[in-house]
Image: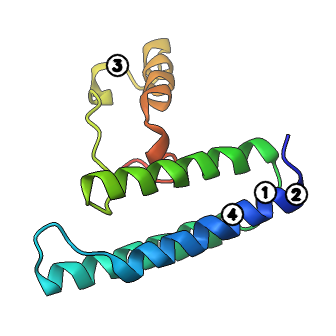
Amino acid sequence: MMTAAATRCEVLGLYRRIFRIARIWQSLSGLTDDTLKEKEYIITEAKTLFRKNKNLTDGEAIKICIVECHTRIEMGLHYRIPYPRPIHLPPMGLADKKGRKFKMQERLRKIAKPVYLHSHEET
């Protein structure tokens, strides 16, 4: 188990790393407009998610957020796309909204959601 000081240092390090990445980011297309939009997205997304989670006290929840952050950074750098990769899950319209099957489908969808999308709400 990490101490609070070590966790704080890791989170602040991640925050700084994201802003360093945004500063040198180049879009895959090479167009200036695309690069500026993607840099702005990286900065806005980081600020939004870090502010949303700043009051977390549960160690396990903090650990999940850290893993999500590492994953999104590595995927963004690897694919050169700052946006979360889409996932394709079967629609929930197959089960009755009241029955057991609906609850089971909800549970399966939650389990199937990749680590890099935990902070995003389902649309």
| Residue at disc 3, secondary structure | loop
In which quadrant will I find the N terminus? Answer: top right
Which x, y percent locates residue 71?
47, 47
Cβ atoms under marks 1 and 2 closer than 8 Å: yes
Residue 27, image x, y percentages: 20, 72
Q: How far is disc 2 from disc 4 in space, using C-alphas?
A: 10 Å
Lower sequence index among marks 3 and 2: 2
Identify the secondary structure beneath mark 4. helix
The amino acid pointed to by label 4 is Val
Quarter residue 22 falls in: bottom left
Query: Would you name the residue on which mark 1 appears?
Result: 7
Viewer-proximal residue, 55 or 68?
68
Extreme residue in the top direction:
100
Q: Which mark is residue 33?
A: none
Q: Which residue is mark 2?
A: 4
Q: Is residue 91 left or right of residue 97?
A: left
Q: Secondary structure at mark 2?
A: helix
Q: CB of mark 1 within 8 Å of CB of mark 4?
A: yes
Q: Are marks 1 and 3 in contact (CB under 8 Å)?
A: no
The residue that label 4 is drawn on is: 11
